Image (spheres, rainbow, N blue to C red):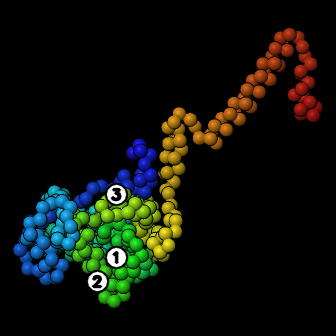
Amino acid sequence: MNASISPKLSFGAEAKTGPVAFSSGAISSAAPTLTNADFLRQSCASMRLGVGPRDHQECPHRVTFDYFSPHDSEGLTLVIEAAYRQVFGHCHVMDHERSSELEAQLKDGRLCVRDFVRGLAKSDFYKTRFFEGVSPQRGVELSFKHLLGRAPLDQQEATSSIVIQAQSGFDAMVDALIDSAEYAEVFGADTVPYVRAWTSASGMPMINFMRIAALEQSFASSDRSKGTDSILRNNLINASPLTIKVPPSFDYMSASASWSGGKPPVNYEKLWRGLALVGGLHLAGMFLNVTTQIAGIHTLDRIPAMFLGL
């Protein structure tokens, strides 16, 4: 398919950059483990597993590929802005709403990108907009989008997260997603989560393309503007069709694409044919009138007056 007419363009996929990463040299790999998740990650790192796909049973908390992670000020700025955009669902953040303390901790090496993302997801800004102000199902599907870069794979996965949230609180649900084997494998410690359901990722069914399109709708709009009720509930429960709102720009692209075969759209062709017929009849009438005038025949002079009732 021609990239210029790909349906992905309508949902803003062309505006999404690749993974953005940042690594601070101040973070020591030998730091003491404070949580079970940290212990699992460090124990897997000590196994020196090769980069690439592998069985999760062997070590489910090991990132399987490496990204170049800059550690300069430019890389820091890029990763902070990318994290705000992804985790806060493209909501506009005022200067006084930014998490300046988390930014400072990321800059001086007290936090890695993974824990910076964790802090943003647990912030009051996030909870007000994507936890307290929406239905539980909507909150979970947005958390999956913001933190894992995809929609829930099925209703059971969404329900499990709702149960964790109900029993242990919202922060526990955030920890469950960020400390998951999937997050470790896909994003590691230095990469900001990003929407990754536009491509055929391993283990992800093709229906997730439709689900992320329904959640995303367009790159520029914020997740807060898409309502407070779940978008995916019926599709996850009984596989009902998804309603995807296509931005107006796609109408133009669709019309342009229809000319790619060298033929105009059907409606435009009908209009052109009608105008050509009317114009042809008008020119024929003028030619006939001029011809009779030259020949000295004036019987047609009364026709315009007859039409006017004169």
Q: Position of residue 290 (x, y in %)?
A: 80, 16
Q: How many marks?
A: 3
Instruction: Return the residue nearer the eye: 194 or 156.
Output: 156
Q: Amino acid at mark 3?
A: Ser
Q: Is residue 297 left or right of residue 247?
A: right
Picture quarter with the N terminus:
top left
Kindly identify the amino acid type of the residue bearing the numbered disc 2.
Answer: Ala
**Which residue sits furthest bottom?**
167
The disc at residue 126 is 1
Residue type at tag 1:
Tyr
Relative depth, front residue between 165 and 83? 165
* Residue 36 versus residue 46 in the image, above or below: below
Q: Which numbered disc, 2 or 3, marks the residue closer to the eye?
A: 3
Q: Nearer the viewer, residue 213 or 223?
A: 213
Closest to the camera, between mark 2 and mark 1, is 2
The one of 182 and 88 positioned closer to us in this rendering: 182
Q: Is residue 47 left or right of residue 89?
A: left
SS for callout 2: helix
Residue at position x 62%, y 41% in the image: 266
